[in-house]
Image: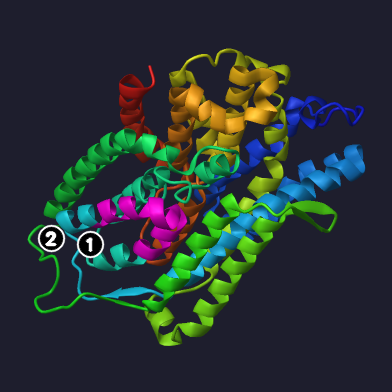
Amino acid sequence: MLAAVEPVLVPLGLRLSPWSVAPFVATLVSLAVFPVAAPRLWHAHFPKIVLAIALTFVLPFLALFGGEAAHELGHILLADYVSFLVIIIGLYAISGGMLVRGEIRGGPRTNTALLALGTLMASVAGTTGASMILIRPILNANAHRTRRAHIVVFFIFLVANIGGCLTPLGDPPLFLGFLAGVPFFWTLHLAPQLAVLATILLAVFYAIDRSLSRREGAAAAPARAPGARLRLDGKRNLALLAIVVGAVALSGFWHPGKASVLGIGLPVEGLVRDAIILGCALVSLLWTPRSLRADNAFGWEPVREVAIVFAGVFVTILPVLAILKTGPQGPFAPLFRVLDAPWQYFWATGVLSSFLDNAPSYLAMLGTQIETFHGDLAPRLGAAALSASHPRFLSAVSAAAVFMGGVTYIGNAPNFMVKTIAEQAGVEMPTFLGYIVRWSLPILGPVFVLLTILFFR
């Protein structure tokens, strides 16, 4: 599965066999097949299944590459996975301490308005923050509905992905681009694409929800019960959420150097950011009355499931990312040789973002563009020059990474959490494959084609 060891000056991606991506493919296949073919086995033993698949890569990798392999695994776990999990835990804990009270009735207009609100919130509070704040209120508002899966699916499309495109705080790929040199407010270039996409999807959702609501006889349900006053309990958590957003923003501007953690060099600003986020999560847990969290059906199972599944994804994705970094010189050379137009970058980034997690896919394509357009000057000029010299190309990569993260449950971090929370609330969500075949491809596919024609030809 792995190629023989070469001198360390040769990039790791050139020393790995293309077969080293097999465990990652197996991880995706297990997510698609086991919950359908063997649901009891999967729910009872999915940590063991994920671990077994991961070990088929880790053990040969360590045997052939020794200390270098240990360093690479340590780096992706400490620098990427831990930071990913910290922000998930922080936003989950803080948002779990806020609860919208009042008898909201989830009719088509109300649901469409909530999805629109979440879409706007996502660029400020992040897709994870907006998702964790709003998913329970919208589920509670529709508790009387017989069919609710479509509401959660469009929630994933709009709130957990598409809405996060306007600021680096909105979605992890854009934050990584900001760290690489893309100006903070440059992402506002994506506002026209967001307007087109959100308008179409909200209209489609309203039509579907209205049709289903009529079949259920709930179309005439009032937006809320007469006299029911809407209020937000746990408002103090808003201050903690603001601190988290500020800590994430600060880590993009402040670069004091690196610190060694278990022999891995990690940016100090990232360690400080993660410490602040965990501190805010702890304060929220101590600060919020237990009764409020109980009313919010707060529990750690969604985080546990995400932590286990994405641990396997992060480990097995290592060879995929290493090979992608080699660009036109590596085993995936045919992919990179055809990339010479914005629309090609849009679709290549989108396909990768749908199945490889959108943040690393964005970085791989961003690096390819910088190398292609700036060559030997790439290390000095970075993404800042790219945003000025080839904005349509950067827009294509940025839009695809954010928008197409909603094509699968693993395209973006909040997707899986939203699915798990919905299932705990009694919503029968589509399977991994069912989500793609029945929802994302038929609905998102044509809209993405339209975006290609309008913006990326």
Query: Is residue 116 magenta-colored?
Result: yes
In the picture of the structure, the residue carrying the numbered disc 1 is 145
Quadrant housing residue 241: bottom left
Query: Which residue is pictured at 33% across the width and 27% down the height?
Result: 451
User: CB under 8 Å between callouts 1 and 2?
Assistant: yes
Quadrant housing residue 57: top right
Residue type highlighted by circle 2: Ala
Is residue 322 placed above or below 332 in the rendered structure? below
Q: Quadrant of the N terminus?
A: top right
Query: Is residue 154 magenta-colored?
Result: no
In the picture of the structure, the residue carrying the numbered disc 2 is 218
- Count of all numbered marks drawn on residues in the image: 2
Quadrant housing residue 281: bottom right
Chain part drawn in magenta = 114-135
> Tag 2, which secondary structure?
loop
Could you tell me how far apart the alpha carbons at marks 1 and 2 are, in whole angstroms? 8 Å
Query: Which residue is pictured at 34% across the width and 55% down the height?
Result: 121
> Tag 1, which secondary structure?
loop
Count residues near mark 2 (Cα–Cα under 10 Å), then give few for <14, some for 14-19, many for 20+. some
- Residue 91 image position (x, y, % from top left): 49, 64
Count residues near mark 1 (Cα–Cα under 10 Å), then give few for <14, some for 14-19, many for 20+. some
> Quick check: can you spot residue 43?
no
- Residue 322 image position (x, y, % from top left): 72, 33
